[in-house]
Amino acid sequence: MSVYSIDRIPIVISGACSLQKLPRQLTAWAVDDVLIVTDEGVAATGIIARVQELLASHGAALFVAPPGEPQIATVDAAIAAARRLRNPAVVGIGGGTALDIAKLAAGAAAGARPMDDYMMCVHPFAGHLPTVMIPTTSGTGAEATRTCVLADRHGRKSWAWDDELCPDVAILDPELTVTLPPGLTATTGLDAFVHAIEAASGKRCNNITAAFALQAIRLVCRWLPVAVAEPANLLARQQMQEAACLAGIAINQGGTGLAHSIGHALGTLYHLPHGLAVSAALSAILAWNVEQAPEHFNAVAGAMRSGATPEQVPALFEELLASARLGAAAQRFAAIEIDAEALTHLIFSAENVPMAKNNAKAPTEAEGAQLAHLTARRWRQLVEPATGPQVR
């Protein structure tokens, strides 16, 4: 019998028009000021204007992050913006980048250290400002996790982790996701699936973690193809937001695995969007995973399709990729040629090896090299569908 703990999860407010609940929450905290953290894509929409109108009675400052994944300098600027405010809360609005920056700013602003000092748990966070996370995508689950991903000073994709980074409140308003293009809907939704399958099959899985992860798998398999094909379908959008949040809670407890180790390495080497990178990686390694540890995939198989067996899981995942049109989403990155040797090296780097070790079966370095070559080959099939499985 194992001994484990289930850590704090946010208050979750879900449903159309749930954004309207934001002012009440801030009033309950009796905060004076609010730092709104978002990204350029969301800032260009009318969402931020709606939020600013809702927060008219609070002093609301706006921090807009530049495109791409978070950089330490960007996070330091957000931390400084939070420290200038009186008794503030932090509201993150956007995809994983905006939410991670918001969480890091709220955590670091409670102390005096710069962001560098918190990377890879070198120092603990001293506390955190009250936080509300409002995702405009359905994938990262950042609204529910205590992990933040950002690039270190050398440009490597790395992370910060602390209980203080877990948000206080997550608002899941599906109306904020209906304008997400099909490609981003697909890759972010598949990111949620990869979170869920790795949490459900990894070494740290337990009954409670599995409950969150398996329900996320069911929801993604049922509703992601609908959300891609019918962007304005609010039911599909809400189901996908809830799937992403459930998967975020699952990895908060159970961690991720080898597809994330490879995906992070791909992000460092080629700056591939995270959802695309981990989906391609899982497609390459899933058959190996199941072959090595089939007992870890019994419940996963049933969640993907009633009555399915572990041996069917890789084919079921390929069906999901096809129905989500991942190949089409990958086309803009078709010029990228993956260097399997460089990829192998990064799979086992300090920032990525903990994920590989949590995999259903931790690979040896020789197996990692083999799987890196499989990833490079599968990538070419995705971006050149005429020579491989049809996934458009």
Image: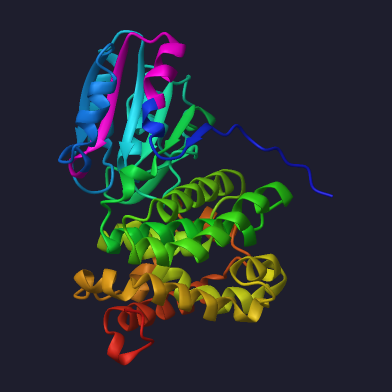
* Along the viewing direction, whichever of 208 and 338 lies nearer the viewer: 208
Residue 195 rendering spot, x and y as whole percentages: 51, 56
Q: Is residue 228 above or below residue 379?
A: above
Compare residues 59 and 54 and report the one nearer the observer: 54
Q: Which residues are magenta?
A: 21-41
Residue 241: in magenta span:
no
- Is residue 344 visible to the viewer in this orientation of the structure? no
Who's the residue at 60% across and 65% down the image? 362
Q: Quadrant of residue 316?
A: bottom right
Q: Residue at x 57, y 70 (%)?
A: 364
**Residue 345 pos. (x, y %):** 40, 66
User: Does the segment drawn in magenta span residue 38?
Assistant: yes
- The quadrant in which residue 160 appears is top left
Q: Is residue 145 left or right of residue 41?
A: right
Residue 274 lies in quadrant = bottom left
- Residue 250 visible, this orientation: yes
Q: Nearer the viewer, residue 238 or 98?
A: 238
